[in-house]
Amino acid sequence: MESSELRNTTPGGGPGAGDEGYAKSLTNRQIQMIAIGGAIGVGLFLGVGGRLEFAGPGLMLSYAISGIAAFFVMRALGELVMHRPTAGSFVEYAREFIGPWAGYASGWMFWVNWAMTGIAEITAAALYVERWLPDVPQWITALVALAVLLTVNLLSVKLFGEMEFWFALVKAIAIILFLFVGLSLVVTGAGVGDTGYHAGLHNLTDHGGFLPKGFGVVLMALQGVVFAFAAIEMVGIAAGETDNPRKVVPKAINSVVWRIAFFYIGSVLLLTLVLPWTVYRSDESPFVTVFSAIGLPAAGDVMNAVVLTAALSSCNSGLYSTGRILRSLASRGEAPAFTARMSRRHVPYGGILFTAVVYLFGVFLNYWVPKDAFDIAVNVASLGVITTWMTLLYSQIRFRQKVRRGEVEPSTFRMPGAPVSGWLTLAFLVGVLVLMVFSDDWKQQVSVGLAPVLAVVLAVGWWVISRRRRPGAAPGASPAGGPRGGGATAAPKG
């Protein structure tokens, strides 16, 4: 595969170094579905069952609170995108408005999150396929899935966008089908198969009340619910490769709030209206529980296919986003030089391959590593979600401060209620971290306890990078003052 280095691998070229070479290939249709896909994941199709078992009908309050926070995060992102669309997304905004160290730290935390999430999802995909191909070793299925997704990402961003469009469409249709069936059962008050239960409003209160375990449990559920919204920030990364992002991105971001209300809160509400919350359990998709109860043929197979789609979509997004973030970091010498490579197809294949190797290694490793150790690693990585959101919010706050001082032009798409809404959302995210410390799940407690270790590793890495830079040079400049790794050739224009 022929490639070129970055035209400008130092930040001396100003904001957006590392954006060169990308093609504006993503369409409005694809961006809208990427936004939908980011808001619908395995956390909805599988995770809701366990959370209903844990919190009861009041779980919808957890989704509503987290959804409001997610909306403000997206509006903060939107304001920054309108200021300057960039494939580096929050990494570039953190670097510009907080400081170089913030871009470096948030970028690597984002990569750690997606690296571990991708390993988990590609492994889960192999487990889902095992339902239909029990005699095929899981590692082979995982390897085939990774090979397909890697090929798609390496060929072109347009192909990635098209695959995400269809992945998101499958997930959306599955939820819409459930909402239609569930609403029909509730409106008619029909009996649900042979369960002995009838759908209706009474299911919200007949089994211990709306808050059967108290409001405290609803708060404790927030930590899992927030992570269910991971990937909504994908729209910001895709903005750098979107035709007319200043028109397309605001529409996608504004629609996040109703998508969350429609898909998440609507689904949780109907699940609790169709069947008592006591029926659901963590080891089965709540949608399978409902469809199986009403006697829908092959409900398990259909939902297994949908969850497989969600897992593959997550891996697909992980390869796409980390490739762009790593290239942004590499443009300033903060990631391996190889991750800066761009193909003639305008694909940052170096960063994508870097993440794919980690996925491949993880697929084999997790078969030998004890499950608890693997779960701890995934929980540590999930801290990257909160880190990313907090970075976006604080970057937007600093951006507004510069606007007030007249240092930058105001954005045409503003975050409502800023800066108060930004500070309140930041406080909420800090509260989620505190809740993780007091979680009943010891693995989450250990994960938060390991967070300082990650901070030390990042601090050491930043110290090493800073030491390599000549005194007085702009962050990211090589000792020679030129591009790291020697004379780089120009990247192709998108």
Image: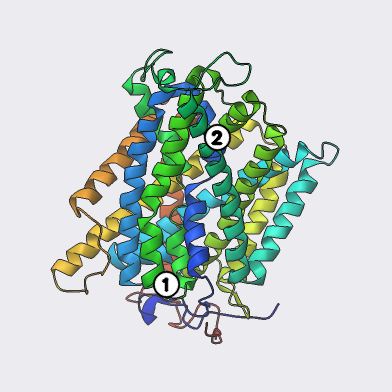
The residue type indicated by label 1 comes to: Gly
Q: In this view, does 233 lie to the left or right of 83?
A: right
| 159 over 421 or under it: above or below | below
Front residue (pair 218, 289): 289
Outermost residue on the right side: it is: 135
Q: What element carries label 1?
A: loop
Q: Where is residue 363 in the image (x, y as percent from the top left)?
A: 70, 46
Q: Is residue 377 in view?
A: no
In the rendered view, would you say 68 is above or below 215?
Answer: below
**Counting residues from the N terminus, which is met first, the one under dot 1 or under dot 2?**
2
- Where residue 294 sits, quadrant-wise, is top right
Q: For residue 137, which quarter of the picture?
A: top right
Q: Residues within 10 Å of mark 1 (few under 14, many from 20)?
A: many
Say which of 119 and 334 sits in front. 119
Residue at image position (37%, 26%) is 218
- Dot 2 crowding, Cα within 10 Å, few <14, some 14–19, many 20+: some
Q: Mark 1 points at which residue?
A: 476
- Identify which residue is drawn at 51% across, 58% down: 33
Image quadrant in which you'd find residue 393: bottom left
User: Is 211 placed left or right of 280 in the picture?
Assistant: left
Task: Between label 1 and label 2, give the one nearer the viewer.
Answer: 2
> In screen coordinates, is 458 left or right of 366?
left
Check disc 2 and report its element: helix, strand or loop: helix
Q: Is residue 17 above or below residue 268?
A: below
Q: Which three-letter amino acid code belongs to the residue tagged 2?
A: Val
* Residue at mark 1 to residue at mark 2: CA–CA distance: 56 Å
Residue 162 lies, in percent from the top left, at 60, 64
Residue positioned 45% across, 61% down in the render? 235
State the residue position of label 2.
Answer: 181
Q: Going 41% across and 37% down the picture, which residue do you hit?
A: 265
Nearer the observer, 53 or 195: 195
User: Split into 4 quadrants, where in the image is the N terminus?
Assistant: bottom right
